[in-house]
């Protein structure tokens, strides 16, 4: 039985280093950061939690957006605060749905 090959996404520097060393080098040190290419916003969270999420996202190579824009790729939503006092979705959630931004529930 053939074993499936694993395909990893690596930074371009990996190819240059393989050529430089004349062999395939370990790609684990060339993996892109976890949140590379993602811009994340949050809604319904307290300031301390927002700041914590921002630090994590930026530490792992992502972008953090205080507001919501079309450049955002994900909106993290606190389920308990997804609706206003009238039972309507908050503005960020409505915009995320309209712009087809992935919403992730906390």
Image (spheres, rainbow, N blue to C red):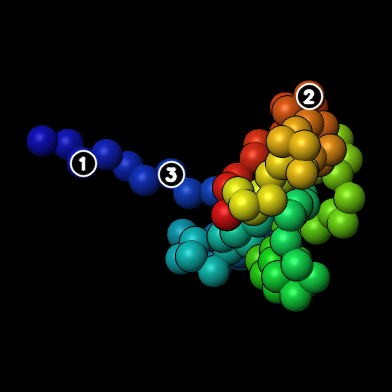
**Residue 47 seen:** yes
Earlier residue among tags 3 and 2: 3
Q: Split into 4 quadrants, where in the image is the C terminus?
A: bottom right
Earlier residue among tags 2 and 1: 1
Give the Cα distance between marks 3 and 2: 34 Å
Give the Cα distance between marks 3 and 1: 12 Å
Name the residue beneath numbered marker 3: 7
| Few, some or many residues within 10 Å of mark 1 (<14, 14–19, 20+) | few
- 21 sits left or right of 65 in the view: left
- 97 sits left or right of 10 in the view: right
Secondary structure under tag 2 reads: helix
Give the Cα distance between marks 2 and 1: 43 Å
**Relative image position of residue 75 (x, y in whole percent):** 71, 45
**Relative image position of residue 21 (x, y in whole percent):** 55, 67
**Relative image position of residue 61 (x, y in whole percent):** 71, 62
Residue plotted at (65% across, 40% down): 103
- 75 sits left or right of 1 in the view: right
- 85 sits left or right of 34 in the view: right
| Few, some or many residues within 10 Å of mark 2 (<14, 14–19, 20+) | few
Give the foreground label among 2 and 1. 2
Write down the quadrant of residue 73 in the picture: top right
Residue plotted at (63% across, 61% down): 33
Please tell me how many numbered marks the rendered image carries: 3
Secondary structure under tag 3 reads: loop
89 up-or-down from 18: above or below = above
Name the residue beneath numbered marker 2: 98
**Relative image position of residue 36 (x, y in whole percent):** 69, 54
Name the residue beneath numbered marker 1: 3
**Residue 58 seen:** no
Q: Are marks 3 and 2 in contact (CB under 8 Å)?
A: no
């Amino acid at each position: 039985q053939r074993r499936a090959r694993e395909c990893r996404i690596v930074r371009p520097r990996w190819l240059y280093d393989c050529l430089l060393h004349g062999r395939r080098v370990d790609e684990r040190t060339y993996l892109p950061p976890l949140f590379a290419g993602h811009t994340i916003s949050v809604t319904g969270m307290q300031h301390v939690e927002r700041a914590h999420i921002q630090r994590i996202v930026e530490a792992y190579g992502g972008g953090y957006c205080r507001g919501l824009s079309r450049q955002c790729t994900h909106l993290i939503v606190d389920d308990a605060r997804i609706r206003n006092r009238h039972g309507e979705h908050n503005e960020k959630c409505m915009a995320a749905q309209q712009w087809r931004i992935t919403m992730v529930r906390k």
